[in-house]
Image (spheres, rainbow, N blue to C red):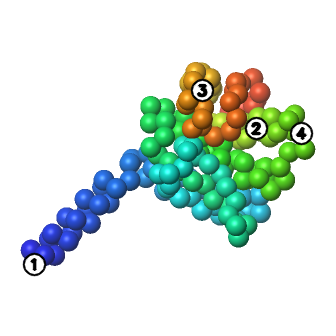
């Protein structure tokens, strides 16, 4: 009986403390499908250099690697934006198609930024002011922080570029 109680407490402890709250929220709530509408596998990877990174496996399936240890000081909205940016790269087929030149590459990045912001906006997680706050937070990242944020170093202009409009 004591052994059973000890086992239960061990399981509770492991479940409660093994994954940070942001990872639990994101890994349970983040749904992503790729360019072919296949569900993307989302894995926690403490060795990943970026907070969130979209990759194609050797077998051709899509995966997002999330390292919750990176950029811990970012707001939950900025962290969700990062995960959504990685998802956008897969949904929009950027890893499948690639870019012909630097102009197309930055067009793809802009499209992924808008997709990520749109997901937060249309899911009701942020309003126009929230998008503006998100934009400001991302644009204040320093070089070191950018090395852990998905996509290239850039200035994001979500409100001006994305034209997000309430659906009501």
Tell me if residue 151 comes above or below residue 15 in the rendering: above
Give neighbour class at mark 2: few <14, some 14-19, many 20+ (Cα, 10 Å). Answer: many
Q: Earlier in the sequence, mark 3 or mark 4?
A: 4
4 or 2: tag closer to the N-terminus: 4
Please give the residue where the numbered disc 1 appears in the rendered image: 1
Q: Evaluate if marks 3 and 4 touch, with contact meaning CB atoms under 8 Å apart.
A: no
The residue indicated by pointer 4 is 101
Question: Of discs 1 and 3, which sits in the foreground?
Answer: 3
Residue 127 image position (x, y, % from top left): 59, 30
Q: Quadrant of the N terminus?
A: bottom left
| Image quarter in which the C terminus is found | top right
* Cα distance between the residues tagged 1 and 4: 66 Å
Residue tagged 3: 143
113 over 36 or under it: above or below: above
Q: Residue at x 85, y 35 (%)?
A: 102
Residue 26 visible from this viewpoint: no
| Residue 126 vertical placement versus 11 (above, below) | above
């Amino acid at each position: 009986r004591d052994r059973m109680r000890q086992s239960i407490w061990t399981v509770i402890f492991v479940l409660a403390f093994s994954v940070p709250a942001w990872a639990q929220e994101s890994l349970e709530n983040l749904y992503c499908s790729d360019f072919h509408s296949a569900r993307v596998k989302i894995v926690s990877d403490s060795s990943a250099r970026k907070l969130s990174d979209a990759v194609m496996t050797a077998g051709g399936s899509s995966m997002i690697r999330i390292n919750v240890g990176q950029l811990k000081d970012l707001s939950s909205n900025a962290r969700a934006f990062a995960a959504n940016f990685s998802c956008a790269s897969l949904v929009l087929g950027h890893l499948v198609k690639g870019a012909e030149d630097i102009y197309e590459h930055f067009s793809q990045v802009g499209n992924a930024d808008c997709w990520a912001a749109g997901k937060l906006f249309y899911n009701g997680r942020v309003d126009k002011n929230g998008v503006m706050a998100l934009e400001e937070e991302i644009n204040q990242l320093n070089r070191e922080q950018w090395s852990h944020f998905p996509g290239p170093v850039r200035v994001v202009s979500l409100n001006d570029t994305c034209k997000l409009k309430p659906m009501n």
